[in-house]
Amino acid sequence: MSVDIATVKRVAHLARIAVTDEDAQRMTGELNAILGFVEQLNEVDVSGVEPMTSVIPMDMKKREDVVTDGDKANDIVANAPATDENFFLVPKVVE
């Protein structure tokens, strides 16, 4: 894949970055070098390599996926000036 000046300007426009023609020309070369390096990485055979989460072998810490209310409702509304059944009470602002 090759990046041209039009692509650099389009990406800069999408990112809301002002790019001059000289900067776009320079970035074209830099981005093509980066993409060339990524293409080199794609050529490496990693078929026998297992994914790693750390350089030290360790088991992933897992917890049971259970939906709860967090048991924090009373703590959350504790400092509110007015509450009703763990809901904040606020003054009416729309007639």
Image: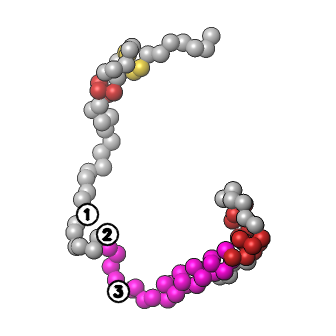
Q: Which residue is mark 3?
A: 48
- Tag 1: residue type? Met
Quarter of the rendering containing residue 36: bottom right
Q: Residue at x 39, y 21 (%)?
A: 87
Name which quarter of the figure residue 26 lies in: bottom right
Secondary structure beneath label 3: loop
Q: Is residue 12 left or right of residue 45?
A: right
The quadrant the N terminus occupies is bottom right
Q: Where is residue 24? Give x, y as percent.
A: 72, 72
Residue 80 at what x, y percent from top left? 37, 19
Give the residue displayed 52% in from the left and 87% down from the top. Answer: 40
Is 43 situated above or below 13? below
Label 2 belongs to which residue?
Answer: 53
| Residue 42 belongs to magenta span | yes
> In the rendered structure, which segment of residues is drawn in magenta?
27-53
Name the residue carrying label 1: 60
Please tell me which of labels 3 and 1 falls first in the chain. Answer: 3
Task: Find out whether the residues at labels 3 and 1 contact each other: C-beta distance under 8 Å.
Answer: no
Task: Tell me if label 1 and label 2 are in contact, CB under 8 Å.
Answer: yes
Sequence-first tag of 2 and 3: 3
- Residue at 61 percent across and 14 percent down: it is 94
Q: Residue 38: x percent and y percent? A: 53, 81
Q: CA distance from mark 3 to mark 1?
A: 21 Å
Residue density around tag 2, few if under 14, some if 14–19, many if 20 or more, within 10 Å: few
